[in-house]
Image: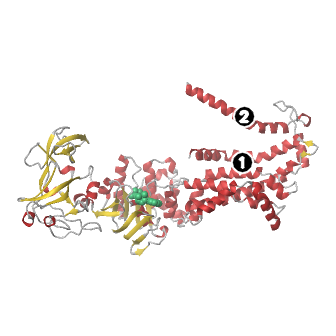
Amino acid sequence: MSRIRLSGLRKAYGDTVAVAGIDLDVADGEFLVLLGPSGCGKSTLLRMVAGLIAPTGGRVLVDDADVTDVAPRDRDLAMVFQSYALYPHLTVESNIGFPLRVRGERRAVVREKVAAVAAELGLTDLLRRRPKQLSGGQRQRVALGRALVREPGAFLMDEPLSNLDAKLRTTTRAGLTELHRRLRATVLYVTHDQVEAMTMADRVALLDGGRLAQVGTPAEVYDTPASTFVAGFLGAPPMNLLDVAAVVGAHGVRASAAGLDLALPDDGAGQVSPEGSRRALVLGVRPEHLVVRPPGAADAPFRGRVLAVENLGSEELARCVLGDADDGPVVTVRGARPLGLAAGDHVGLAVDPARVHLFDPDSGRRLERRPGSSTPSSPTPSSPTTPTSPAVEPGLHGDRPLARSLP
Amino acid sequence: MTDRMRAVRGHVVLVLVGLACVFPIYWMYATSLRRPNDVFETSLLPWPLSLASYGEAARELDVLGLLANTTLVAVAVAVGQLLVALLAAYAFAAYRFRGEKLLYLAMIGTWLVPFQVTMLPNYVLLYQLGLLNTLSGVVLPQLLSGVGVLLLRSHMRSIPAELLEAARMDGRGSWGTLWTVVVPVLRPALAALAILLFVTAWNEYFWPAMVLQRSGAVIQLGIRGFLGTEGVRWGPLMAASGLACLPVFALYLVLQRQVVSAFVRSGLR
Ligand SMILES: Nc1ncnc2c1ncn2[C@@H]1O[C@H](COP(=O)(O)OP(=O)(O)O)[C@@H](O)[C@H]1O
Ligand SMILES: [Mg+2]
């Protein structure tokens, strides 16, 4: 299996920049998922790796060989397309065998390899059919078989599950993961579905407007999002992001907004900066980390009113507006059903300070806490840093220590 | 109930139009099967039947030879046009290149320019090339069909890009992709176009008449012989015409399914 490296890969269509300079290393045998909203350049990036689109700039390396100007057929990469792109005039057997016949392999060899792949994917009984006579799931497996039969250096997949129904998607996901384990295959997998990314990936690369927003294991990108974009993309519903003012008081730093007065973990900031200095911050809390408390409870820094409660079966979501006004900031709470809330209820919300994320309001970047401070479970920065993620200094907060940055 | 009424009314209209289309053809065969003295009869059924007109046509014309020549010309024109259109449409659909639009418009333009405008220059050119009175002289100037290019390009554009990309990933070059993916996928459209081109070439009258001059090369010119100055000889004229139509009908019967499906599908697009 191969290793794929991208350096400064770029693609512009006139004034539209689809991919804006990407450096990425897909290790041998790694399942790397390119995740991002529709239109963020995932397909363009994948097609440049495949060789179907010529990049505007940058290089593509496969196993240390520069293949930027090499034809797709000579890159030893197989692709699975979103539409499956099966040859409609050929039987399943001929579809799977197509790449082998192009290579001029002997008929008997082709038949043997196709039979082996078909058996592996449970397609043996369908070999005589044409794509039109197959269900969506079967077509998807034929497309996979056509890639597998080549025994390529790496697999490129562009949203291969997005045309399947929810149930089939779940089983196929598990099947793909299993296949990856068994083959130790290098996979570059594109999707807009975060569940696919979280469940299948060794590492996730989040793409935002043609740039890498963060690269890391599913746990890293979920637990320590590098930016408000990542925080707001991952999770269903995503992280609550609130504009707050951080005020240095006598007893440390407090974040405040309408209906919110939260002590930020004491970093000794109070000693550094003069009392009363302020700074704008974005505060992030995942819905599942908010705990419902009685209204007015002393340990509930959030205070608000329930707007609506949604039943998800095993869990419930409550949307709450903070403060007294109707147009205050809204947070979502997620917890086991029943939450014990109804629309109109007044409610208090508590959060473990270790679960609070802070971001710079201008750049959107994560502000990192000093390791070993009063928050023992404080997250460590995700190891594979990206061009856009801030270089984390051993300090109070990310690029600028919070307290010292206060005016 | 009203739906049913509407359907019935629609079918009545269709039947009437169908009859109007079929009637002249029926009348041609009916006339050709009457006895020589009955050709001006107007009874719907030709009775008693007689093959005399066919005998007369066969005596005066080498019907088989003419049919063979006509077939040769029509097949050469249709196949040539199909090949040229296929390659041109593929280039226009799959590649972006300098002057593409201009070239495309020029090709479509040949379809808009009336035959009368090009006939004399072509005739002079053939004369200079020494191709007058030859079948290749009939075929050569007709090799480009603007409609063919137009039709095939739009069909090719409707092939999903991912299908062609899949072929590229699987190792096919553009030439291989054309023959192993594009042509098989477009088979119904190609069949329909082939028939269209063949029938058009088959029915071509004026251009062969100009190039061949002598009335003995293709059947359409042979038939002209029955339109004499002393009157039209309807019996053998209809008999020869009826024979001239048979190959086209046969072709249609063989490829009917493809033709209908292609026309239906291109109509939905
Ligand atoms: N051929 C093209 N011409 C112009 N713009 C394009 C072309 N292909 C893609 N784009 C633009 O590039 C961006 C990224 O597209 P794409 O890679 O398909 O996104 P994704 O796969 O993440 O949904 C989009 O804004 C899209 O409009
Ligand atoms: Mg895409």
How is the protein colored in the picture?
secondary structure
Residue B185 seen by the camera: no
Residue A68 at x, y = what percent? 44, 72
| Residue at numbered disc 1 | B251
- In the rendered image of this protein, does residue A5 appear above or below residue A18? below
Please count the marks in the image.
2
Q: Residues within 10 Å of mark 2 (few under 14, many from 20)?
A: few
Give the left or right position of residue A327, taking residue A93 as reference.
left
Q: Which mark is residue B19?
A: 2
Q: Earlier in the sequence, mark 2 or mark 1?
A: 2
Taking A391 as reference, is A139 left or right? right
Give the x, y percent position of residue B206: 80, 52
* Element carrying mark 2: helix
Please identify the residue farthest to the bottom as the structure is shown.
A65
Question: Which quadrant of the figure contains the C terminus of chain A?
Answer: bottom left
- Can you give x and y, in whole percent of width and height, for residue A135 in the image? 45, 47
> Which chain letter goes with mark 1?
B
